[in-house]
Image: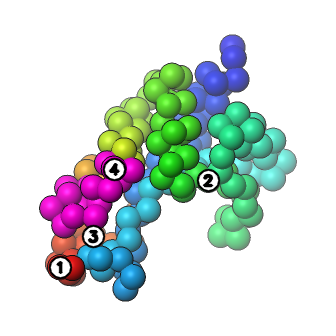
Amino acid sequence: MDIGSYLSGFADGEGSFCICFSPSQRHAFGWEIRPSFSVSQKRERAEVLQLFRDFLGCGTLRNSQRDGTIKYEVRSISDLVEKVIPHFDRYPLLSGKRQEFEIFSTICKRMSRGEHLTLSSFKELVELAFRMNFTGNRRYTKEEIFNTLRER
């Protein structure tokens, strides 16, 4: 098995594709949209996180105070679109996580084209994001985001 397949398999079990929303005064509609790809491990198994960073050529490693793990994370839209997404296109995920990746990929590509900068497209991206990780905890509901969007 080559390293690319290994990393995709590892991410299939331990990785996360996430689209987070945060209220923001400096963003046009009052909300920031932040995509990220991450993988966490306990310190004694953190060498695989270095493999991700070396193989993909991007991302950061940091200590997670919340759960005492080390986290590999990519947040840069250009790195997500140019490095992370092509990796998972070449070495596909095999679980149901593939569907979340497809939505994540669509959102990142649309953001890289600036589509999150128009209100109608921003709303579409919110709708797409809420189709992902539907069993996970979210800080804000889709309704809270839509009810507090502001016009430019």
Q: CA distance from mark 3 to mark 4?
A: 26 Å
Residue 108 location, x and y as percent?
39, 48
Pointers 2 and 1 in contact (CB under 8 A)?
no
Q: Amino acid at mark 3?
A: Thr
Residue assigned mark 3: 141
Mark 3 or 4, nearer chain start: 4
Between the residue at mark 2 and the residue at mark 1, the CA separation in whole angstroms equals 32 Å
Label 4: how many residues lie within 10 Å, few (<14), some (14-19) or many (20+)?
Answer: few
Marking on residue 113:
4
Give, as a single range, the part of the protein colored magenta.
110-127
Mark 4 or 1 closer to N-term? 4
The residue located at (28%, 64%) in the rendering is: 117
Q: CA distance from mark 3 to mark 2?
A: 24 Å
Question: In terms of depth relative to the viewer, which is nearer, 133 or 127?
Answer: 127
How crowded pointer 3 is (Cα within 10 Å; few <14, some 14-19, many 20+) is rated as few
Tag nearer the camera, 3 or 1: 1
Q: Residue at x 38, y 65 (%)?
A: 33
Q: CA distance from mark 2 to mark 4?
A: 22 Å
Numbered circle sitting on residue 73? 2
- Badge 2: few (under 14), some or many (20 or more) residues near its Cα, within 10 Å? many
Q: Secondary structure at mark 3?
A: loop
At mark 1, the secondary structure is loop
First in sequence: mark 3 vs mark 2: 2
